[in-house]
Image (tube, rainbow, N blue to C red):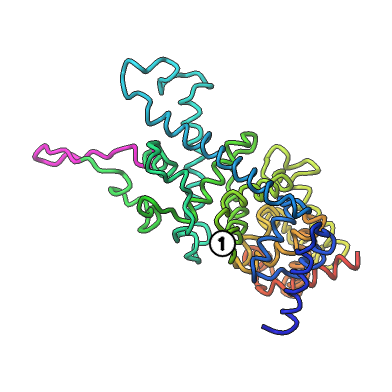
Amino acid sequence: MSTAYRNRIQEFKVALSEENINLKTLRDLCFNGIPFEGGIRALCWKILLNYLPLDQTLWESFLKKQREVYSQFLKEMIIQPGIAKANLGLSREDVTMEDHPLNPNPDSRWNTYFKDNEILLQIDKDVRRLYPDMAFFQRPTEYPCQLILDPQNDYETLRRRVEQTTLKAQTVNRNRSGVTNVSSPGKALNLYPSNEYEVLPNGSEAHWEVVERILFIYAKLNPGIAYVQGMNEIVGPIYYTFATDPNSQWKEHAEADTFFCFTNLMSENRDNFIKSLDDSQCGITYKMESVYSMLKQKDMELYLKLEEQNIKPQYFTFRWLTLLLSQEFLLPDVIRIWDTLFSDQDRFHFLILVCCAMLILIRDSLLAGDFTVNMRSLQDYPISDVHTILTKAKELQDHS
């Protein structure tokens, strides 16, 4: 570790030791990247995402309250419906019209349950393939949620719900001698590649299962937006950062802390996920056009070339902006970009600067390329050095 890096860690420690943290000082420090050592990054993100108050004397009581609130969400939205499902219909006389699965009333418990299952299956499909090039999300967490895994709780877990919903249809084969074979469609048709649906033994859970729970609770609490594909890519880096915190006192509560930080980030970013707002000033279309407006100011020649080739911003900036570049780079690089995005007071304006910088940095190849070559570059961005990209974005900001 270089002397300069050691000094940098020391600067962070000093800033974070203040009883009342100076947000401007912390933002300025974080803008150039946050050290992982000592859990500094995870702590800074909790402050930058407006989760932890700036007054450190409030932390203990605040965190205790928030983690209790999250436990309550688990009880109300996963455990209680699971118990109700496990108990429904145990005795035929108990099944009222209200409890009947075929009850057409949209407000019935069963209707809600089936709707939730649709959302859950989409979340499940997406979180299982989160960062497939890393083993982390498939590994068991050191701190499985005891509330969920308590053997005293006889209820239908999310894991069980997914298994039952996925495998509920059965394939019946009758051979020539009249023997009927019943097998699940998953096995019969090999719907699931090996390992994809492998779950850990009872009593332990993989990191992706924790992420699934966070997204399911978020969807239940925010029915107006529920779950949209891509949210898994936003929650993944936050959870990874908190669940790898070297400080075990923080790491133990990675799930609850991720939930609240993700919720805060989504409150700023959610308009990108709401289709009806796409063309409004807060929607994604406006932001995509902002990238081209800025490019027009900074590099007219490149702007005209992309216009001439009819390369519209939505062809590539939709993913860049909605997912905060989480799909364009490897996870450690995404985390480094997010250090800067989170520390910028107007974080989504800086994201537009980053997108513009990414275009300008490959201007020579874009000016020389045809439509096909250029689209390939923009959908599989060729530069992997995020430091160069962030430096260019800062340069654009300073000259605006």
Which image quadrant: the N terminus?
Answer: bottom right
Residue sitting at x 27%, y 40%? 171
Residue 68 or 256: which is nearer the viewer?
Answer: 68
Q: Give, as a single range, the part of the protein colored magenta.
A: 165-181
Residue 278: name its quadrant.
top right
Q: Is residue 82 left or right of residue 119?
A: left
Which image quadrant: the C terminus?
Answer: bottom right
Residue sitting at x 50%, y 66%? 133
- Measuring from the top left, give residue 150's x and y in whole percent: 41, 44
Residue sitting at x 72%, y 59%? 311
Residue 341 or 321: which is nearer the viewer?
Answer: 341
Residue 242 or 56: which is nearer the viewer?
Answer: 56
- Measuring from the top left, give residue 267's x and y in whole percent: 71, 44
- Measuring from the top left, give residue 302's x and y in whole percent: 80, 67
Q: Which residue is mark 1?
A: 248
Is 173 magenta? The answer is: yes
Is 81 magenta? The answer is: no
Residue 350 or 29: which is nearer the viewer?
Answer: 29
Residue 376: name its quadrant.
bottom right
| Any part of residue 300 in sight | no
Instruction: Tell me the crowding category of disc 1: few under 14, some 14 to 19, or many 20 or more residues within 10 angstroms, Cα based.
Output: some
Question: Considering the numbered disc 1 on the image, is that residue within a helix, a strand or a loop?
Answer: helix
Taking 73 as reference, is 130 above or below it? below
